[in-house]
Image (spheres, grey):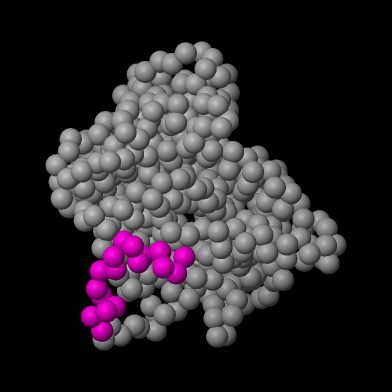
Amino acid sequence: MFDWEQANSSEGRTFTRRLGPTEAFYWDSQFDRAADSLQFVEAESTGSESHSVSLFDIENVRRTWKQVKKVYPLLSARAFAGPDNIGIFFQLTEKRLWEVGPEEIHISTVNSSEEARYFAHSLITTERQLSDHLLARLYVLRHLNHPNKAHVIFHAAHCVTDGTSNNIFLSTFLELLSSSSQNEEWNLEHQLAFAIPCEHRMPTYQLPLPRRRWKYAMGQVISSLRSQKLSGGHTLPRKFTKMTPYTPASSGSEVVELSPETSVIVVRNCKKLGMTFGNVYPVLAQVAFGRLLCKRYVAGHIGEDEWDYRRKEPMVHSGPLNMRPYLSKLRDRTGFAGIGVAVCYYFYTLPFMPLGSASRLKLGDPVPSFSELLSFDRFLLRARSIRQQAVNYINHPLFLDIARAQTFRRLEQSKHIALRWQSGIEVNSEELTAKVPVQEQACEGYVMAHGGSSFGNMDAIIAQNYPRKAKEGSPLRIKLLDVGVILHSKSDQLYLGAATLKQRLCVHSFWDRNVYSDAVVTEWLEEVKSAIEHYLGSEIGDCPNLYWPSSGSRL
C-alpha cells in the first residue's frame, strides 16, 4: 500500500506511493502552511579568499543541491490528494532529480547576519514559499562584505522532513558542498527504498498481518483511554474564541540565552541529579508560568473566579518525540542517514501550578519569589515525575502502537480543520468571535499549557567542521558559526524549546500572535530564564540522593 509504484510518463520514469500515517502532516501545510519548518546555519569557508568564493558560488551550490536530491529523492517529490481527499500521494519523476527547478534555489547577498536572520523570519511570516509541487527549497545568502561567509537556509514542508531530518539535510549538504568529488552513480530504486514511511520501520511491521492489526488495535484502545484522562488545564493569558482553531496563526518567535558559564553549570547540575534538561524544563516553565500569573493577580488583572480556577487546575504539556531510536536503522551505502518524518507525541501532566507559601496571595501583595512558590526539593520531585512519565511511555510494550494511534488522531483533526478552512467558514455570530473565559476553554477536553521539546547539544548533533572526515593533512573547508530553527506556528500554539549552541543554553518560543500577546510571551521567557538560573544556575552537591524528597512527599 505504501510501496513505490513505477510508471512511464512524458518526463520519464515516474514513481508514486501513498503517504504513511505520520506523513499526513501534509494537512498541516494545507492549513495556511502550519508546521512548515525552516533551519539555517551561518557557515564560513576556511580556505583561501579566492577559493572561499567558489564554495558558495552558484554553480557549486547547484551541483551540491542535485547531489543531495539524489540521496534524498523525497525533496523532489510532489504531493497530491486522491479523489474526495481519500489518500495523499507522493509523485516523483526521475527528471526532476537531474535538474534544478526555477524556484528550488534562491541565491542572493546580504550585508550582515542580522539581515540574513530577518530574511529567514520573513519566509515564515509572509506569503508561503512552498506548495504541493515544491515541498523543499534552499536559500544561500552570501555576505557582501565577507564573501567567505554565507547563511544556508533549508525550508521544507512537514510531510517530508522533521527537526531531525532538517539537521541531517544540512549536514549532508555542507559535507557535499565542501567536497569536490561528484558521485554520479546513484541508483534511484535503491534510494527510494529508504524513502519509506516510518511505519515500515517499526519492529511490528515484521510480524504477520493479524498480529500487527491486533497490536495496533490495542494501541488505539490504550491511547483513547489515556486521552480521556486528560481534562481541564490552562495556559498563559490569551484571547481564545470558538473560531481560533480555524484561524491561521500569525507566527511570533523569541529567544533568550544564558551565558556560557551558567549554561555549563546548568548542564552539569542536571547530570549530577540524573536528569536531562528535557526532564526539568517543563517544571521550570511551570514555575515561571505561576510567577507571571501571580504578578497579574496581585496587580488586579486577573479576577477572583479565574484565579480560583487556575490555582487548582493541572497542567498538560505535549511535544514531538523522535521515534528513530526505536525503529530499525536505515543507512544507505553512502553512509548518509535517511530523512523523512519520524515523530510521535508525548503528553506529560503536572499538578496545579506551584504557589507554596503564596497560596493565600491577595490583591496588592508582593510578588512571591521562586523559593516561596516552589522549594528546591519540590522542584526536583516534579522533575522526577516528568522523567518517570517519559520512562513509562517509551518502555510500554506497545509504545509505538500507542504513539501511532495518538498521531493518527491528531492528524485526522488537522485534516478536518484544513478542509473546513479551505471550504470557507462564515462568521455570522458574535458568539463565534467572543473571547471564551479561561474556565470554559477546557469544556470539551483539555487545555495544553504549552508544547515543545529540548533538542540537546546542537554542537554534537550537527558537525561543526566540514568535510567531517578530512584526510590527514588536508585543511577544513567549512566551519559553522551559528545554527537556528524557525517554525510556522499552528493555531493557538505556544511552543517552548531549548538547545545548547556554542556552549550557550538557548530557550526559544514560537507562538500564535492572534492568541498570545508578544509582551506576555516575552515576559514568560524571561521568567523561565530566571527560573533556570535560580534552580540550576549555581553548583549543587555531588550526591543527588541528598536532594530527593521522600517517596511520600506531595508534589
Nearest the camera: 44 or 20? 20
Q: If the image is split into quadrants, where does the N terminus sit?
A: bottom right
Nearest the camera: 156 or 173? 156
Assess whether residue 544 is covered by the magenta stretch. no
Q: Which residues are magenta?
A: 429-445
Nearest the camera: 355 or 199? 355
Q: Residue 193, image x and y in percent?
A: 70, 57
Q: Residue 299, image x and y in percent?
A: 15, 46
Name the residue: 59% across, 80% down.
86
Judge whether 133 appears above or below 403 on screen: below
Assess whether residue 442 is covered by the magenta stretch. yes
Tell me if residue 258 can be seen. yes
Question: Number of marks in the image?
Answer: 0
Name the residue: 47% across, 20% down.
268
Judge whether 486 appears above or below 474 on screen: below
Can you name the residue that lies furthest to the front here?
A: 360
Residue 541 placement, left or right of 337: left
Name the residue: 30% across, 85% down.
426
Q: Residue 442, image x and y in percent?
A: 40, 64
Q: Residue 335, image x and y in percent?
A: 65, 39
Residue 331 placement, left or right of 282: right
Judge whether 192 appears above or below 389 on screen: below
Residue 480 placement, left or right of 257: right
Q: What is the quadrant of residue 531 in the picture?
A: top left
Tell me if residue 482 can be seen. no
Nearest the camera: 494 or 171? 494
Name the residue: 43% across, 31% down.
379
